[in-house]
Image: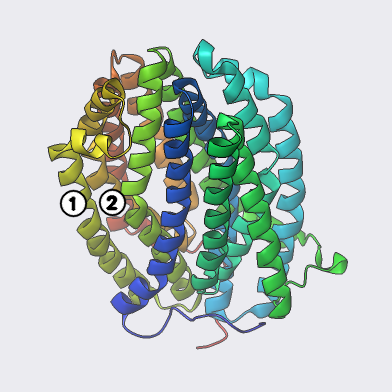
Amino acid sequence: MTTDGHLLTRGAIFPTLIKFSLPYLGASLLQALYGIADTLIVSFYGTPADLSAVSTGAQALYAVMCLIAGLTVGGTIIIGQYYGARQLNDMRETIATLFSFFGIGCIFLSLISMAFTPYLVNLLQTPTEAIRPTGAYIFLGSAGLVFTFGYNAICAVLRGVGDALNPLKFIAIASLINVILDFVFIAGFGWGAAGAALATTLAQAASMILAIRFLKKKHFLFTFDKTAFQIHWDKLKLLLKIGLPVALQDFLIMLSFLIILAIVNKMGVIPSAAAGITEKIDGFTILPALSLSAAIAAMTAQNIGAQKITRAQKTFYIGLLTTLAFSIPAFVLMFKAPVFVMSLTSTHPDIIRFGADYLLAYSADCLFLGILFAVNGFLNGCGHTTFTMLCNLITILILRLPLVFRANDLFEVGLALPASAGIAVLLSLIYFYGGFWKKRVLNVVSNQL
């Protein structure tokens, strides 16, 4: 599999983008669905305290997972540019460094997260009734961070070479195992939030092991033998240069949501549970935009590596229009029928009422995020990840958090999100139309021209 993959530098842009993004969307959809499955199964078979624990614990773990996923996105971008330039040896060294250095880092991250679980539970202002199940959820979820990195890293590498289908298969397996174990541990054994976390950890472990076996069978560039695990310091520098800003950006965004969560938790267990459900709904509605953003990034990276600048720019425009085709209906549904949307996920009348207020205020964020994800996907593919990080950091500190600190209810909390996203869109479009993205970040020389 040294040269297997899919070149995204040829053919009509729209069909190529859709063909590549659909498996990515399917993978993201499956991840969101088994996240929702955790929430729904706990909602029906657990207590409000268990539901609050899953909501709070999932947000905390997701912040760490965003840090991991962001680092692997750097691998997708660099590998994509090398693949577009047909520099296979540089690809091999990048993959080896990604698996070796960051794999060791994730082991330490997992241990640290497990050790500091009690402090994190208190920091999040967890409702008293939910302290114990939240601690169990975070501890067991932290134990699986190494598996989270493993299959995220494998999927990132495959997407860099234009293969989005096999990552979908790996995640489908994880999703199926996760849902089955949810019913066994939560509905069957009555383990509540702890059962949900254990199900996710075991599912990710199984998916990672199967993915490694698949790649070894296909004679992948990275053999997973002891001698293959090496750190190439020039490639590590590139991975940190490109991946670290993405990781920090995603982590800071999730950190802002954790701060929001802590504020909401102080409002009581019902608002906390409602906010947890709405976060699942929000994550579900932005999946098409998020998936297209990843597809835009991968396509842009390969075309930049192949020095096809005009094609890369056209990829952004087509990707933006496609993203809006999904974002606009999501906005209309959440704005016009928030109570109906909430009633699909809960039967508790107060949870539905609080959640509907949040969705109504949040709805405009669907439009802004659709634009922002498309721009960020393009800029990240070009290697300009530092700008996207700074842009999000500025809007979070200046608008999102100050507005949330002044909020008195979930409706006012929800308004803070589209306000900050709108400013981020403005800054990103100025950067794009100002032509700053044309400055090369990676000195990749194409071998296929």
How far apart are labels 2 and 1 at the CA level?
A: 9 Å
Image quadrant containing the N terminus: bottom right
Q: Under tag 2, what secondary structure?
A: helix
Instruction: Kindly indicate whether the residue at mark 1 contacts the one at mark 2 (C-beta within 8 angstroms).
Output: yes
Q: Is residue 89 left or right of residue 249?
A: right
In front of the other: 139 or 328: 139
How many labels sit on residues? Answer: 2
Q: Residue at x 49, y 14 (%)?
A: 127
Q: Residue at x 25, y 21 (%)?
A: 412
Amino acid, disc 1 = Ile
Tag 2 residue = 370
User: Who comes first in sequence, dot 2 or dot 1?
Assistant: 1
Amino acid, disc 2 = Gly
Quadrant for residue 83, please give it. bottom right
Asked if one can make out residue 378 in the rendered structure from this viewpoint, the answer is no
Q: Position of residue 52 (x, y in %)?
A: 46, 24
Relative height, residue 403 to residue 448 (above, below): above
Count neighbours of disc 2 (C-alpha within 10 A) and say few if under 14, some if 14 to 19, many if 20 or more: many
Q: Position of residue 341 (x, y in %)?
A: 24, 39
Asked if one can make out residue 27 in the rendered structure from this viewpoint, the answer is yes
Q: In the image, which disc is placed on residue 351? A: none
Tag 1 residue = 328
Q: Position of residue 112 (x, y in %)?
A: 73, 31
